[in-house]
Amino acid sequence: MALDGPVVSLVEIEPGLAVLFGDEPPVGFDVIPFEMMSPQANQGLTDKLAMASGIGNLAAQGAQGATTVQGLVRLAPETLQALKTAQPMTSGGWNLGSLVTSKGKIAASVRWAPVTGAQAASILTALGPAAALLALQVQLASISRRVDENIQLTRDVLRALHEDQWATLLGLHETTIRAVREAQAVGSVNDHVFASIATRDADLRKQRHLFMSLVRRHITALATDGQSRRAYVQQNVDQILADAHGMLMAEWSWYRSQVLRAGHISRDEANAAENERLLAELVAETQREHTRAMDDVGDLLAGLERQCRLMAELPAELSLPFTTKRQNIRHVVGMAEALAERVATLRNRVHTQPAPLDPPLTVFAEAVPDDVLRILRWVVPGEEPLLAIADVNLDRLVGEDAYLGVTPARLFISTQSAIRKQGVIEREFPLADVRYVRFRERDKRGPVLDIITTDENIKLTLDDWAGKGQGLDDSRRLANLLAAAMDLPDYERRTDPLLGGESSTARAITR
C-alpha cells in the first residue's frame, strides 16, 4: 500500500511513546528531542534502534532520511484508548496511519511499529536500558507546567498542614526542576549540573517515604465500609488532599533526580560496559518504584473523588472544614478532580469517571427515581454496568422497602433509605455464589423471589403491581436473569452409594 505525502516512521518503545524517524519533523507536531545524553550515546542509540526496527534496511535500499531520528513523540491517551477498540491497517509488519496535529490536521503518513509483538521485543532487547532511559526523559519533558486554581488551593493547604516540611519539600522541588532545565539547556547532565542534587539523595528519599506512608495510611482508612469511609472523608478531607499533593511533589522531585543521575552515568563513555549494567538496574528500579507510587496516589485520589461525588448527591449536602475556611462538598470535589486529572496527565492516561447508569431492565411501578441512579453511579463497585434494578421488599417481621441490583459480577440488596440517605449498599453477593433461584406467582398479590446462595436463603417480595401486565413480565425477566447465573461447582457436588454412586446431575442426564 502506498502512502501519500511525507512518510515518517514511529518505533514505539513503551505504550504511547515512540521514536520518530524521517527527513524532518511534521509541521505542527510536538516532537521532543533527545536530551541529557552525550552525542556519542545518542548516535549509538539511533543506530541500534534503526537496525533493530528494520529502518536501517530501508536506508540500505536507498530510502532517503530513513535513519534520521527527529526525537520522541507521545501518543495522546485518547489515541491509546481508541486503539483498544480499533484495528489499524498493517503492511509488512508495520501499522499504517496518519499523524494528526493538535488542530486535527493530517501532518504526515506514518509507518508505526507498536510496542507489542515479536518485532517490539527484539527492539527493546537491542536497546537495553537506553529504551527506559528515553522513557524517563520524555516524561519530564511532557509535564504540564500549568497550575490551575484548584491545584493552587491544594498546594496552599499542603503548606498550611505541613509547615515543618514545606521548606524542604519546596527546596527539593525547585532544585530538581532547575537541574533538569540546565541539563536540557546544555544537552547533557555534566558534573556542574549534577552537583546540585548529588548530595540531596537522603533528603529526597526521606520526603518521599514520609508522604508515601501518609498516602498509604489514607488508602487503608478508605478501604472500609461505606459509613466509615464517609466519616473518614468528612473528618480528614483537607489532610488527604494535602498529603496527596505532597506525595506528588516529593515523588517527582525524587524521580527527576533519578533521571538526572541516569543521564550523568550515561555520559561516562570511559566505563560504558559496566555502566550499561548499572543503568539497567537504576532504570528498572526507578520505573518499578515510580509506578507503584503513582498507582498509590492515583488510587487514593480516585477513591476520594468518588466518595466526594457520592456525598454531593446525598440529601444533606455537608459543609466540610477546610483549613481556615469552610468549603462545601462541591468545592472539595473540584479540588479532588483537579489533582486526579494532574495524576492522569503525568501518567499519559485519560482521567475517567464511571458513566451514568442506564440499566436495561428496571422493575418498578413507574420510572426509577433519578436520585437513585445518580447515587448508585458512585456506589456500584468498579466500572461494572448496572444490568437490572428492582423495587422489592425484604421479607422480615416488619417489611422494609429495598432495592435489588444486578451487575455482570454480583447482585446487591439494600434498604432504600440506606442508599438514598447514606449512599450505602448493605449486602452484596458474587453471582458465582448463586445456587438456585425460585420465582413464585401469587393470586392477587405480587410475586415472591427466592435466591439461594452458598451461605444465605434470601426471600424477597414485590408489590401488587408486579403481579400483572408489564410488571409481571419484568419480574419474570429479573428472575430469569438471576437464574442464568445459577451454578453448582464440582467441589460442592456429592455422591452416595445408596443412589448408585452417581451425582444427582449425572442421574438426571442419563434418564
Image (cartoon, rainbow, N blue to C red):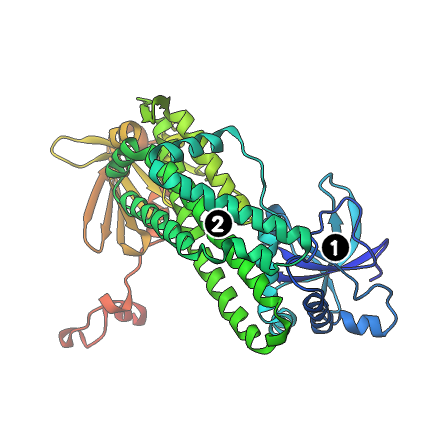
- Please name whichever residue, 411 or 458, is drawn nearer the observer in this view of the structure: 411
Q: Is residue 39 above or below residue 486?
A: below
Location of the C terminus by quadrant is bottom left
At label 2, which amino acid type do we have? Ser
Which of marks 1 and 2 precedes in the sequence? 1
Location of the N terminus by quadrant is bottom right
Residue 270 rendering spot, x and y as whole percentages: 62, 75
Residue at 84 percent across and 74 percent down: it is 60
Q: Residues within 10 Å of mark 2 (few under 14, many from 20)?
A: many
Residue at 23 percent across and 51 percent down: it is 452
Rounded to the nearest whole Å, what is the CA distance between mark 2 and mark 1?
37 Å
Q: Residues within 10 Å of mark 1 (few under 14, many from 20)?
A: some
Quadrant in the picture for residue 165 = top left
Circle 2 SS class: helix
- To which residue does mark 1 refer? 97
- Please name whichever residue, 456 or 384, is drawn nearer the observer in this view of the structure: 384
- To which residue does mark 2 refer? 253
Q: Is residue 273 above or below residue 265?
A: below
